[in-house]
Every structure is written in C-alpha cells, then in structure tokens.
Amino acid sequence: MALLPPFLNGSSRKKRAQVISIDLGSRTTKAVLLERRGESFALTRYAMLEAPIFDKKISPEQLADHFHTISTALQSATKFISVAVGLGDAVVRQVELPQMPVDEMRGIMKMNHKSYLQQDLPNHVFDCFIIPPRAEAAPAKAGDAPRNAGAAFSTKFKVLVAAAKQQLIADFLQAASLAGLTADALVPSVVGPINAFEMALPEVFAKETVALVDIGFKYTSVSVLDRGELATNRVVNIGGNQLTTGLAEMKNISYAEAEGIKIGMASEVEAELQMQVIPLGREIRASLDFFEHQHDRPVSQVYLSGGTARSETIIQMLNSEILTECKTWNPTASLQKTLPGQQAVEIEHVGPQLAVAIGTALAAY
Ligand SMILES: Nc1ncnc2c1ncn2[C@@H]1O[C@H](COP(=O)(O)OP(=O)(O)OP(=O)(O)O)[C@@H](O)[C@H]1O
Ligand SMILES: [Mg+2]
C-alpha cells in the first residue's frame, strides 16, 4: 500500500525497471536498489547510512542532500524512489467502509476520519487500500459452512487507511525533486515488513496467525497478521536506544561503550540487558494478548525484524519474556541476489534490518 499524494495516482504509475527504496529510520537510513526480473525481483545493492539528524526536524534541503548521498552509495542511475514514512509520522488503521472507489474513500477519510480513526488529524493526507477478501477454503463436507461465508457478498470492504501530515509529504516531494529524483510512492513504515513478509513467507502469511515485530532505534512496531490480514497494529516507544541507555546507566559506562557491548558481546552483560528487554517484551506480549482476547485465537509465532533483531541474545531474551516462539526472518528470501562482493556476504546479517526498505520497494511496483 502506497501513501500517495493526490497528484501521484497509483493507477497511472509505470512499471519501473529499477526502484530505490529508502527507509528513513530514526537512527539508520536503510536503502535498497531493487530491479525487476520478469515476475520476480533482484536485490542489486543496499546501503546503510547514519540518519542525517535524529533529534529534530530535517529541512527539505538537508533531506535532498541525504537522498543524493544514498543514490551515490547505491551507484544507481535510476531516478525513481520509494520512501518509507517513519513510524512516528504516519497513522495506519484498518477500518470497514461501504463499497466504493478508492478516490471516494480518500474523500470520506478527509471529512470523517475522526469517527473512523478516533483521532483528529488536521492537515493530513489520507490514502486507502482495499484489503482483498480472504480466499476461504471450500467447506470439507456439506453443511460445514465456511467461517465467513458472507464475506464475498458483504456490502463492506476492509480498508487499510494511512494518514500523514500534508507538510511532511510536501517536504519529501520537494526534497526528491531538489535531488533530481522522482518520488513514486510514500509508504507508511508499518506496511514495509508486511509486504516483505508476504513475499518471503507466502504460506505462513496466508494461512497462519503471527506477529510481525520490527524493533528499531526509537520505536517497535507490532502487527498481528491473521491469515493474510492486518488485524492489529501498535507502535511502542521502545527500541535499541532505550536498551543501550539503560545498559549504560546500569554499568555506569558511556553510551558508545554500552552500544559496543550490546552489539559485540551481549552475553557478558546478560543480566543487565535482560532488565532492559523486559519492558519491551511486556509491551509486545500485551499487544498479542489484546488480539488473542478479541479474536479468541492464539498468535503462533513472533517474527522479528529491525536492527535490534540482529541480536540472537536479545531474541532469546524476548522469547522467554513473551512465551511465544520468537525468531528472526529473512526479508530477502525470495529475491534474486546480485549483490557485489562484501555485500553478498554481509546480507545474511543485515537482512532483518532491511525489512522496511524491501517492503517499501515492493509497494512501489
Ligand atoms: N547486532 C546488533 N545487536 C543488537 N542491536 C543492534 C545490532 N545491530 C543494530 N542494532 C541496533 O539496532 C538499532 C537500529 O535499528 P534500525 O535501523 O532498525 O532502527 P531505525 O529504523 O533507525 O529506528 P526506528 O525504526 O525506531 O525509527 C540501534 O539501536 C542498534 O543499536
Ligand atoms: Mg525503523
């Protein structure tokens, strides 16, 4: 699902041969260059850069410089970019709307979003994506009615609504154009891992009830996917930054030192790190409980992505806190890889951190 400004209409978009996708994380910018190869895609190059500014607002000019640095790092001639809108900057919700064209849905959201989203969002741009009805398996025996037999005839659509500040969208577009690039799509970050997951693990996506948890620097996004649908999503204000800060305080060492230990030798500070992971684990557990109570259905697995999910130690700690199997997954699994030397080796470790960038690229195609 792409959050598009009104004059960039999804249906008029071209099928690009190459797309640069940029995930502007609060600490690290992740970018990938994806190339279309018939029906599949190839990951040609990736880049990880320090975020230009991570404690205050960035100007379109600074952002343009950053875009330029990214496109140079990717050694790409393509002008087309797809950008993930940060977890703090976009609102994503699933709602039910009567059947109507998407254009009309956008209008309804603009006027009435308060009653649908329980939130007043002045000066926001809205986009809507109709979630295709679940393809339910035919009943095994006569009289064994499918669970949502009415779905195909339902008068309502399940719709994913995204909203972002008009000014933010305008700034992104201006930055892209200052850098000589074309913004094809602006995609809410939350959607990134979901798109990438559908492509990497299509069977699990379609048939199981799982949680996708992306743990970054400032935020953790928790989405419950129930057999191909986004059932709930929540953004928790805890990420790797909080783990490092807490560790530094407990060990009475500098932030940089604590960061080094967390990444390089987490097992030596196990007790202290575990203390930092507990609140995050509780928040994730609470999101799963919320879904499970509402739907009376267990979440069978927790799939982790984001920079913090690169740590096997942290995954194990979360596992014992959440008590549902936690594991990382590989968002590049179904992509062809044509990466240059060192990147081809490192992708195995970096993969989970690229989930948002890869999913954002897929949304643009
Ligand atoms: N091997 C590792 N072990 C533990 N933590 C790691 C490792 N590698 C990276 N991190 C942590 O990952 C975090 C950055 O992750 P990521 O790039 O996903 O965040 P971001 O997208 O910039 O932030 P956000 O999504 O919150 O806006 C940092 O806090 C860093 O300490
Ligand atoms: Mg992130």
Image (cartoon, rainbow, N blue to C red):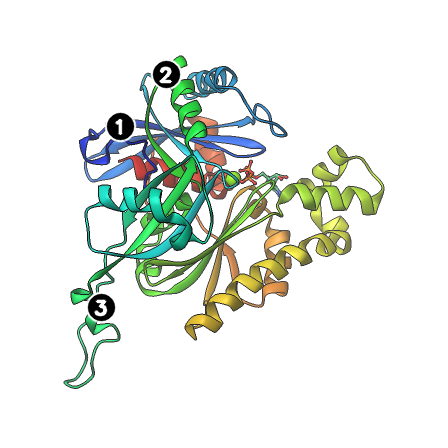
Check residue 86 in the rendering and tell me which mark sits there, or answer none. none
Q: Earlier in the sequence, mark 2 or mark 1?
A: 1
Q: Depth-wise, is mark 1 or mark 3 nearer the camera? A: 1
Q: CA distance from mark 2 to mark 3?
A: 45 Å
Mark 1: give few (<14), some (14-19) or many (20+) Cα within 10 Å: few
Task: Residue at 20% x, 71% y: name it.
Answer: 150
Mark 2: give few (<14), some (14-19) or many (20+) Cα within 10 Å: some
Kind of residue at disc 1: Phe
Seen in the image, is 304 located left or right of residue 178?
A: right
- Secondary structure, mark 3, is loop
Q: Residue furthest bottom?
A: 143
Closer-to-camera residue (161/36): 161
Closer-to-camera residue (344/351): 351
Kind of residue at disc 2: Ser
Closer-to-camera residue (216/145): 145
Task: Provide the residue designation for mark 1.
Answer: 7
Which x, y percent locates residue 177? 37, 16
Q: Is residue 316 visible?
A: yes
Task: Provide the residue designation for mark 2.
Answer: 177
Which x, y percent locates residue 268? 76, 49
- Quadrant the C terminus occupies: top left
Q: CA distance from mark 1 to mark 3?
A: 36 Å
Mark 3: give few (<14), some (14-19) or many (20+) Cα within 10 Å: some
Q: Depth-wise, is mark 2 or mark 1 nearer the camera? A: 1
- In this rendering, the answer to whether 147 lies above or below 248 is below
Check residue 136 in the rendering and tell me which mark sits there, or answer none. 3
- In this rendering, the answer to whether 155 lies above or below 196 is below
Q: Identify the image quadrant of residue 71.
A: top left
Task: Residue at 77% x, 52% y: name it.
Answer: 272
Q: Are marks 2 and 1 in contact (CB under 8 Å)?
A: no
Seen in the image, is 134 located left or right of residue 117?
A: left
